[in-house]
Structure formats: C-alpha cells, structure tokens
C-alpha cells in the first residue's frame, strides 16, 4: 500500500516442465488527475471512485469552488476494492456563458498518499 518500487520472485513448478523463477517488479505511482467532467447548470453527475487498497479506508471529498456542491456526505469508509459514486452538482445560479472550472479532491484519511483529483467544469449556458 506504499508508493515506490516493489519487487518479488514468482516460482512456478510443474512435474511436466520443471521449475521456473520470474522476477516481478511493480512501480506504484501517485494518483493521476482525471477529467475534466462537464456538469450542466442545476444538474448532478456521478463520479466513480474506487478504494484501491486491500483494506477498508476512510475518504474525504472536497470541492475548491462554491459553484460546485457535493450531494450527500463529504466522507465515507469504503471497503477494500469497492467503488462508490461521488455526486457533484453545479449551481443553477450561473448567468450567461460564464465558464467555471474546479477540482474534486478525494483524500484518504487512513494513509499518507497524495489526494486523487478530478477536474470538473461547467458553464451558464
């Protein structure tokens, strides 16, 4: 559950073909940004988020612009490897062709990993 390079050796044994060893290397990177997700005024979108960890973890959701609102709780405990839908709504009070861009940030409170970022956007038309 840590960032960085992990190494292991896989040993395969067969009565018919003998034994083989394979070196395996994995590189765990910080979460990459996603989006942008377009939201029409006075509409709600659902953004999928999966807990990538092998244990349940607590996640907190936040938006950096007041024009975007979370629908539902701003935190939850997600079981290992399960997906949740985060609902985000864009205000109905936008006037004209004004374009709004923001970020949905998903932070894990049970690990010290960088937050996941989903770019969101909308306009008044």
Image: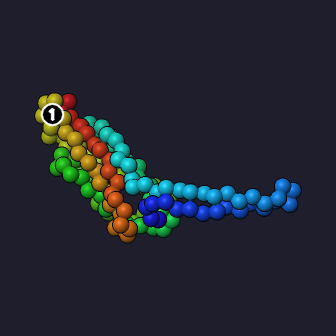
Picture coordinates of residue 7, whole percent (x, y): 56, 62
55 lies above or below 28:
below
Task: Please indicate whether residue 122 sits to the left or right of residue 59 in the image.
Answer: left
Secondary element at image label 1: loop
Q: Looking at the image, can residue 105 be seen?
A: yes
Picture coordinates of residue 100, whole percent (x, y): 19, 39
The structure residue drawn at horizontal position 32% and vertical position 51%, both measured from the top left corner, is 117
Quadrant location of residue 34? top left
Q: Looking at the image, can residue 42 be seen?
A: no
The structure residue drawn at horizontal position 44% and vertical position 65%, both measured from the top left corner, is 2
**Residue most toward the left?**
95
Most foreground residue, 114 or 52: 114
**Residue most toward the right?**
16
Picture coordinates of residue 69, whole percent (x, y): 23, 50
- The residue tagged 1 is 98
The structure residue drawn at horizontal position 84% and vertical position 55%, both measured from the top left corner, is 17
């Amino acid at each position: 559950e840590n960032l960085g390079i992990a190494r292991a050796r896989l040993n395969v044994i067969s009565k018919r073909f003998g034994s083989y060893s394979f070196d395996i290397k994995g590189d765990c990177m910080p979460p990459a940004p996603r989006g942008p997700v377009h939201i029409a005024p006075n509409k709600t979108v659902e953004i999928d988020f999966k807990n990538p960890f092998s244990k349940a973890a607590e996640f907190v959701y936040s938006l950096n612009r007041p024009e975007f609102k979370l629908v539902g709780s701003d935190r939850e405990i997600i079981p290992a490897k399960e997906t949740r839908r985060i609902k985000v709504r864009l205000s109905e009070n936008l006037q004209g062709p004004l374009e709004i861009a923001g970020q949905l940030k998903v932070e894990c409170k049970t690990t010290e990993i960088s937050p996941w970022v989903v770019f969101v956007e909308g306009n008044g038309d």
